[in-house]
Image (spheres, rainbow, N blue to C red):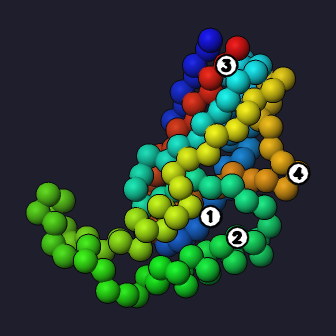
């Protein structure tokens, strides 16, 4: 069995943003040499997630808007206090909660050296904590 792990970086240009990473995952799988197996896409952060959905701007907007409705940025959160271990004030509880709702990973089959996706499926890195450099992992396992 072959196992290939890649680390990728991404940077949102908005405070909250769904960034399509489907092509990056497809390329990683094709370059891995794995013909049949699975690919895991995993966020390295607790205020960002990995999710899958239909790749249309209107769907992306609906998802971001409805998550904001469920977990408003401007609300009262216990995490909004000074954290000595960080040396800063925590104020990103909405990001933690939203990332928990969308999840931190997805798993897809690999057949014939390609990622198996549904007709309208795209893979997203979901940023919920501002404009910053982030990491995610693509791990491909198989023969």
Q: Residue at x 72, y 18 (%)?
A: 33
Q: Are marks 3 and 2 in contact (CB under 8 Å)?
A: no
Where is 134 relative to 18, above or below? above
Q: CA distance from mark 1 to mark 2?
A: 7 Å
Comes first in the chain, label 1 or label 2: 1
Observer-nearest of 103 and 15: 103
The answer to whether residue 140 is left or right of residue 76 is: right
Q: CA distance from mark 4 to mark 1?
A: 19 Å
The answer to whether residue 131 is left or right of residue 13 is: left
Q: Are marks 3 and 1 in contact (CB under 8 Å)?
A: no
Which residue position holds label 2? 60
Q: Residue at x 76, y 21 (%)?
A: 36
Where is 130 relative to 75, above or below? above
> Can residue 133 be seen by looking at this rendering?
yes
From the image, which quarter does the C terminus lie in?
Answer: top right
> The residue tagged with tag 2: helix, strand or loop?
helix
Dividing the picture into quarters, in which one does residue 20 lie?
A: bottom right
Percent across and percent down for residue 19 are 63, 59
Comes first in the chain, label 4 or label 1: 1
Comes first in the chain, label 3 or label 2: 2
> Can residue 131 be seen by looking at this rendering?
no
> The residue tagged with tag 1: helix, strand or loop?
strand
Q: Are marks 4 and 3 in contact (CB under 8 Å)?
A: no
From the image, which quarter does the N terminus lie in?
Answer: top right
Which residue position holds label 1? 18
Percent across and percent down for residue 24 are 68, 41
Percent across and percent down for residue 38 are 67, 29
User: For the residues carrying marks 3 and 1, which lies nearer the camera in this image?
Assistant: 3
Which residue position holds label 3? 142
Residue 119 is tagged as: 4
The answer to whether residue 38 is left or right of residue 125 is: right
């Amino acid at each position: 069995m072959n196992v290939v792990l890649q680390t990728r970086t991404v940077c949102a240009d908005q405070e909250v943003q769904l960034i399509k990473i489907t092509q990056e995952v497809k390329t990683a799988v094709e370059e891995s040499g794995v013909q049949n197996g699975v690919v895991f896409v995993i966020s390295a952060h607790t205020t960002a997630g990995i999710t899958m959905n239909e790749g249309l701007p209107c769907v992306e907007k609906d998802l971001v808007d409805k998550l904001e409705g469920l977990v408003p940025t401007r609300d009262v959160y216990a995490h909004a206090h000074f954290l000595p271990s960080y040396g800063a004030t925590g104020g990103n509880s909405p990001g933690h909660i939203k990332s928990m709702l969308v999840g931190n990973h997805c798993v897809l089959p690999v057949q014939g050296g390609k990622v198996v996706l549904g007709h309208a499926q795209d893979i997203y890195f979901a940023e919920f904590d501002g404009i910053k450099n982030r990491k995610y992992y693509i791990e491909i396992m198989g023969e």
